[in-house]
């Protein structure tokens, strides 16, 4: 391909942030060009969990999408989370009181399948023009436009770039000047297994807080066909300080941990173990400028405590589409005008990121974590409080106040 393609809006990266942005634009009757360096279907290293936030955004995009997911054999409904404290005690927490409902509050599916499902929605839409295998190598400004040059010689001339090209975004690094800092970055290791025993009957995801990798954790997420996504993640600065090899830490936990050893005794590793980066949203950044916005991992929007990424990516795409419509209507693509995007997105997410960052720091105290889990297992009211914290930010805020733990001691 060697030509110049003209478009008002160019979206770089067709993962959840990019495909979601394109679909939200199309819902407003706005056309765009959507590019990706890969050819779909393609894999993306991830925990593979679709949270309630994903469900919330997809419902805004098209309620019928949720009906599809509930009926899709590659999407597994998930009804809660199990926390395993450093001393091995488990706390099973349903997502609210939804276990009795027919529609799942969350899903688990391989990113290979979710990204392909969402990309096909975009590819099939008449207002969205897609280019696969279009790796953007460089950018230049030309008056009121940005020209993006792809590896194969194509040039995309646009008035607005929406960069959704992931954790290692070249646009975010070279044009927006976004830097990755170790204290606000995480590395995760993902593996697929078959034959892991003891998976939850309601497909609860599992977070194991093992002392060796605090403030990180090991996860086990059940998948269709009896498989499981198993991984381990830790903040980059802590990883460097403790000189931890994540692959060896995962192998050791599976081999030696009292809770996990028997469950993996007949498990079989499927494929390769893969490392990936998680740029955390614990630092507020400038997400837009003249003729551009950053979304998803390119905007570094991973939740510092839960590792939530897909929901925040889709949400950023929604806000970016709203702002893009304003830009077109006002014929204004200036930094000053586009910064509404930053303000609105952080108004929705920043308090959540701050609380999650504090909770991440709380996990550094294993004895306190053990105590909360032990107490919750014998106190139904506390169980319900923790359950509600997944949906209610005011409830989650209690976890960072000393009065909350004082009350626990004497309740």
Image: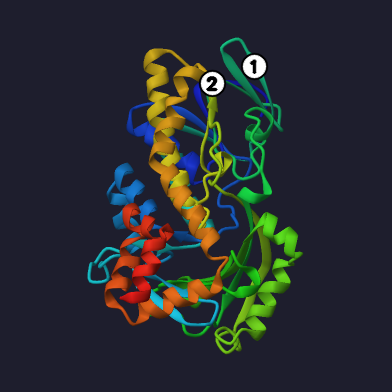
Q: Is residue 30 above or below residue 348?
A: above
Judging from the image, what secondary structure is the residue with disc 2 in?
Answer: loop
Q: Is residue 264 above or below residue 392?
A: below
Question: Which residue is drawn at the image coordinates 37% and 64% (left, top)?
Answer: 404
> Which is nearer the eye, 13 or 134?
13
Of pointers 1 and 2, the one earlier in the residue sequence: 1
x and y percent of residue 194 in the render?
Answer: 56, 78
Q: Which mark is residue 291?
A: 2
Q: Is residue 39 above or below residue 137?
A: below
Q: Say left or right for 105 vs 48.
A: left
> Which is nearer the eye, 37 or 410?
410
Question: Which residue is drawn at the image coordinates 67% and 34% (left, top)?
Answer: 173
Name the quarter where the C terminus is drawn.
Answer: bottom left
x and y percent of residue 256 in the render?
Answer: 66, 85
> Which is nearer the eye, 8 or 163?
163
Q: Is residue 211 visible?
A: yes
Task: Examine the image and state in which quarter residue 26 appears.
Answer: top left
Answer whether labels 1 and 2 touch (C-beta < 8 Å).
yes
Density class for disc 2 (Cα within 10 Å; few <14, some 14-19, many ≥20) is: many
Q: Say left or right for 183 vs 59.
A: right
Q: Residue furthest right?
A: 243
Q: Say left or right for 374 vs 241.
A: left
Q: Is residue 57 above or below residue 237?
A: above
> Which is nearer the eye, 161 or 115?
161
x and y percent of residue 298 in the render?
Answer: 58, 40
Residue located beneath label 1 in the image: 141
Q: Is residue 200 visible?
A: no
């Amino acid at each position: 391909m060697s030509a110049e393609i003209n478009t008002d809006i160019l979206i770089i990266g067709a993962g959840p942030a990019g495909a979601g942005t394109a679909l939200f634009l199309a819902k407003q009757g706005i056309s765009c060009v959507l590019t990706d360096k890969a050819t779909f279907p393609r894999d993306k290293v991830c925990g593979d969990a679709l949270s309630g936030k994903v469900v919330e955004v997809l419902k805004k995009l098209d309620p019928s999408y949720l009906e599809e997911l509930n009926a899709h054999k590659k999407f597994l409904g998930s009804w809660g989370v199990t926390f395993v404290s450093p001393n091995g005690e488990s706390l099973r927490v349903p997502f609210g009181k939804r276990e009795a409902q027919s529609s799942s509050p969350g899903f688990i599916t391989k990113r290979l399948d979710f990204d392909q499902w969402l990309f096909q929605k975009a590819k099939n839409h008449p207002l969205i023009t897609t280019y696969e295998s279009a790796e953007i190598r460089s950018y230049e400004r030309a008056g009121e436009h940005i020209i993006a040059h792809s590896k194969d010689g194509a040039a995309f001339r646009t008035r607005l770039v929406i960069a959704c090209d992931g954790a290692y975004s070249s646009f975010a690094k070279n044009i927006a000047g976004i830097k990755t800092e170790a204290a606000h970055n995480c590395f995760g290791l993902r593996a697929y297994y078959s034959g892991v025993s003891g998976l939850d009957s309601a497909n609860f995801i599992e977070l194991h807080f093992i002392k060796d990798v605090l403030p990180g954790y090991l996860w086990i997420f059940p998948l269709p066909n009896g498989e499981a996504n198993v991984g381990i993640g830790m903040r980059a600065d802590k990883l460097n300080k403790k000189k931890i090899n994540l692959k060896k830490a995962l192998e050791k936990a599976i081999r030696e941990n009292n809770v996990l050893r028997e469950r993996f005794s007949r498990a079989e590793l499927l494929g390769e173990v893969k490392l990936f980066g998680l740029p955390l949203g614990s630092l507020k950044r400038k997400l837009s400028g003249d003729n551009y916005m950053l979304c998803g991992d390119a905007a570094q929007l991973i939740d510092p405590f839960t590792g939530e990424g897909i929901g925040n990516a889709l949400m950023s795409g929604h806000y970016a589409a709203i702002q893009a419509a304003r830009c077109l209507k006002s014929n204004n693509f200036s930094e000053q005008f586009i910064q509404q995007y930053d303000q609105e997105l952080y108004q929705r997410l920043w308090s959540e990121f701050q609380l999650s960052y504090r909770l991440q720091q709380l996990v550094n105290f294993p004895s306190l974590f053990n105590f909360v889990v032990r107490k919750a297992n014998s106190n139904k009211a506390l169980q319900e409080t923790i359950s509600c914290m997944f949906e209610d930010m005011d409830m989650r805020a209690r976890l960072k106040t000393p009065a909350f733990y004082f009350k626990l001691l004497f309740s």
